């Protein structure tokens, strides 16, 4: 009969007396029957005679598919099947239909999923998933069905420690794949944390977006309770895990969580190098693991022993310490987090790497940073002197034809963030590097601090060094030894350690590349006249450094006098007065060591100084040359600068026609020109605006290594170039 047409009319109720008699017969029959085997005997017989577990590393064939181990497979007896029906037990005799296209897992009849209670198409899909075990196109139900077998093997079967470790690692791998699913995230993360706790493995708790209790809550509290019972200090890793399970983080912290963890632990270890000791708990807590798949609870005491419960006072102490560190770490990672918010794909690039605090950069290696560091190490082995063009190429990844001052500073800062210094730094010398210049690279000791403008004492010492080197090196002889400079620098109590390092590096660079008038001009132009006059004795002392004055040094002193707006005709007289010791005021008293550019102390005369009188007499006796020599040396101030100025101007504008030269002279009268004004001005000299702009900037790059005009809402004059033009 068709079951849809069965007569479902209610029958008349059975008399009460008759129902009681039938019930008594049933009870009597049960008491007289042979008792069934207990559950313990049932499991023991199963363990001895039938082990369906396929270990890791072994491959089996099911329905034409090669499946790796860590699954239950076989044909159990009726009793055994009842025991294993809820663990993803694969029975080869169960029908499997092709193709396996139930990717959503709609063919499962039960929750949690069960291999025995699903459609044949769903079984085929599950077997396909077992072949890959990492594809997200399948429903998370297949991963949970596979996990139920791992869970039972870990807690109930006789698995070894090595097998338990592999099971935890496999569950952790599944969690990384399916962590976006809230159910799988809670199920897998809970098991992984408990498994690592039982095995005594280190664990790093991950944040969760769930509104409920953190999956690792039980494991972390148990681990800390065990430490408190055993009087072991709490380290940074476990304090951070405790902070994670008790906190909710914002989107920025979720974005930079690995870096936040590393910085938190580093800061804790710095503040508490021996860890934190917690009070011994007074009460013990019951700790259990509830299986989500089988609805049973495992008592963890037999695995980890008794666990103490932290007091409210201990919780308050932990919160106080953790909150302070977390707040400071969040501020330190603010720029890094905002950068990743805009460019999440650039996490591994150098720009993001340099935004990390220096103390944790080594924990997050960057290939580009390693490439630069290897290149620097190779160059340091060769002496550390290199063309600036090579530095730019390694920093930019390609060769360039021009470079601006702003780009130079950016490259120097990039290397500085990697604890690599480049000398000279335009901000510390007022000298704009050119691609063909030689620079010095060296490693910066300690953690690099952001650039700070040096103090006035630094600039005074730097000017003295620059003037002395300019005069002494005019003979192409390196007469200053480095140890003399070191003694002088470290005697300067007003100089910071960073300023001393910079001065030593700049002095080394000056020994390789002689200081130029342009460098001196940039450092002297803003000084008041009184300060300039105080620098004249420095040049004079440098000239007589070796006890005699070669002609080249006399010429160098003259150039210094012109830069200082002093009377050039007084050079010979000042040198003579400086040499015979009419007791000038010393710039620095003799400290017993060799000096660089000191004026002799009162009453002292150099024993071997001479003005090369034979050369001067021969020049004076020659009537054809005496006027030229005297005219160059003793000309009045109004004539000499004018003559030199015309020569320098002619050389500066060499290759420029009169129209472009006149255009430059008009442009520098203002700091900004709009588009229409620039067009009209170029038209006055019969020039096309576009061609004139290109021509002028090409000329400025050749002469000053910077453009003259910068396009921004019109045309802005580069003040660095304008200031150098106005000084001519």
Image (tube, rainbow, N blue to C red):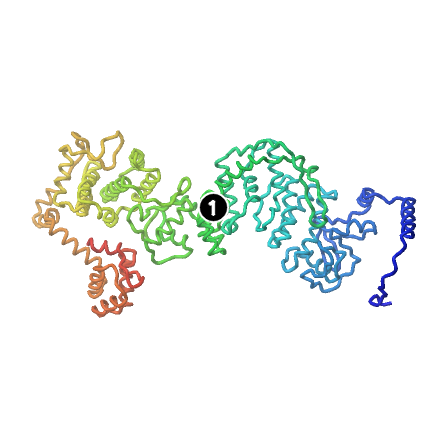
Name the image quarter holding residue 45. top right
Looking at this view, is 236 or 612 the one in front? 236
Q: Quadrant of the C terminus?
A: bottom left
Name the image quarter holding residue 560. top left
Q: Which residue is mark 1?
A: 330
Name the image quarter holding residue 580. top left
Is 721 above or below relative to 421?
Answer: below
Please state the horizontal and vertical placement of residue 642, each as a whole percent of the image. 14, 53
Is 63 positioned to the left or the right of 562 in the image?
Answer: right
Q: Residue at x 27, y 55 (%)?
A: 704
Please state the horizontal and vertical placement of residue 470, each as a whole percent of the image. 24, 44
Looking at this view, is 346 or 213 the one in front? 213
Looking at this view, is 658 or 324 the one in front? 324
Q: Mark 1 Cα within 10 Å, few/some/many (few <14, many 20+)?
A: some
Q: Quadrant of the N terminus?
A: bottom right
Please state the horizontal and vertical placement of residue 51, each as a whole percent of the image. 78, 47
Dot 1: element: helix
Please state the horizontal and vertical placement of residue 145, each as a whole percent of the image. 70, 53
Q: How many marks?
A: 1
């Amino acid at each position: 009969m068709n079951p849809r047409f069965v007569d479902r009319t209610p029958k008349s109720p059975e008399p009460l007396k008759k129902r009681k008699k039938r019930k008594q017969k049933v009870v009597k029959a049960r008491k007289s029957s042979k008792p069934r085997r207990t559950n313990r005997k049932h499991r023991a017989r199963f363990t001895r005679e039938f082990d369906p577990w396929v270990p890791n590393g072994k491959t089996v064939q099911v329905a034409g598919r090669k499946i790796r181990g860590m699954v239950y497979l076989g044909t159990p007896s009726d009793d055994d099947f009842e025991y294993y029906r809820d663990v993803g037990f694969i029975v080869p005799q169960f029908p499997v239909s092709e193709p396996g296209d139930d990717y959503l897992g709609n063919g499962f009849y039960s929750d949690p999923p069960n291999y025995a209670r699903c459609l044949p198409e769903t079984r085929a899909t599950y077997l396909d998933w077992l072949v890959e075990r990492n594809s997200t196109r399948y429903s998370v139900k297949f991963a949970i069905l596979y996990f139920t077998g791992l869970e039972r093997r870990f807690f109930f079967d006789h698995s070894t420690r090595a097998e338990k470790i592999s099971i935890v690692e496999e569950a952790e791998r599944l969690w990384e794949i399916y962590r976006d699913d809230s159910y799988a995230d809670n199920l897998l993360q809970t098991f992984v944390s408990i498994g690592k706790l039982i095995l005594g493995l280190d664990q790093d708790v991950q944040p969760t977006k769930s509104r409920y209790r953190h999956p690792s809550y039980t494991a972390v509290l148990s681990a800390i309770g065990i430490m408190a019972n055993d009087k072991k200090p709490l380290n940074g890793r476990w304090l951070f895990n405790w902070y994670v399970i008790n906190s909710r983080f914002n989107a920025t912290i979720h974005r930079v969580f690995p870096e936040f963890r590393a910085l938190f632990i580093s800061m804790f270890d710095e503040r508490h190098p021996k860890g934190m000791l917690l009070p011994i708990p007074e009460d013990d807590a019951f700790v259990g693991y509830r299986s989500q798949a089988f609805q049973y609870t495992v008592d963890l005491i037999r695995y980890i022993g008794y666990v103490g419960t932290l007091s409210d006072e201990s919780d308050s102490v932990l919160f106080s310490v953790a909150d302070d560190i977390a707040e400071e770490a969040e501020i330190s990672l603010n720029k890094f987090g905002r950068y990743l918010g805009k460019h999440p794909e650039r996490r591994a690039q150098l720009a993001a790497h340099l935004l990390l605090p220096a103390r944790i950069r080594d924990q997050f290696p960057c290939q580009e940073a390693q490439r630069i560091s290897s290149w620097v190490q190779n160059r340091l082995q060769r002496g550390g002197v290199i063309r600036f063009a090579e530095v730019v190429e390694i920093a930019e990844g390609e060769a360039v034809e021009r470079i601006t001052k702003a780009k130079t500073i950016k490259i120097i800062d990039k290397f500085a963030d990697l604890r690599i210094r480049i000398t000279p730094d335009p901000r510390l010398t007022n000298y704009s590097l050119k691609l063909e210049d030689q620079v010095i690279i060296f490693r910066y000791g300690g953690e690099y601090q952001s650039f700070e403008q040096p103090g006035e004492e630094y600039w005074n010492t730097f000017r003295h060094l620059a003037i002395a080197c300019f005069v002494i090196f005019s003979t192409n002889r390196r007469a200053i030894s480095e140890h003399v400079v070191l003694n002088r620098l470290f005697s300067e109590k007003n100089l910071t350690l960073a300023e001393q390092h910079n001065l030593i590096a700049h002095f080394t660079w000056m020994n390789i590349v002689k200081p130029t008038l342009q460098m001196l001009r940039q450092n002297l132009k803003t000084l008041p006249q009184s300060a300039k006059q105080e620098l004249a004795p420095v040049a004079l002392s440098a000239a007589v450094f070796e006890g005699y004055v070669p002609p080249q040094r006399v010429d160098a002193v003259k150039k210094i006098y012109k830069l200082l707006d002093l009377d050039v005709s007084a050079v010979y007289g000042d040198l003579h007065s400086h040499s015979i010791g009419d007791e000038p005021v010393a710039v620095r008293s003799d400290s017993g060591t060799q000096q660089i550019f000191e004026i002799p102390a009162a009453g002292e005369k150099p024993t071997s100084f001479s003005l090369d009188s034979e050369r001067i007499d021969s020049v004076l006796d020659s009537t054809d040359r005496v006027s030229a020599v005297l005219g160059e040396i003793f000309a009045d101030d109004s004539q000499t600068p004018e003559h030199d100025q015309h020569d320098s101007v002619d050389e500066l504008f060499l290759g420029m026609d009169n129209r472009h030269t006149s255009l430059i002279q008009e442009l520098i009268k203002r700091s900004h020109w709009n588009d229409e004004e620039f067009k009209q001005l170029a038209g006055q000299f019969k020039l096309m605006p576009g061609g004139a702009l290109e021509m002028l900037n090409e000329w400025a790059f050749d002469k000053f290594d910077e453009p003259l005009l910068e396009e921004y809402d019109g045309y802005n004059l580069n003040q660095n170039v304008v200031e150098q033009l106005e000084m001519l």
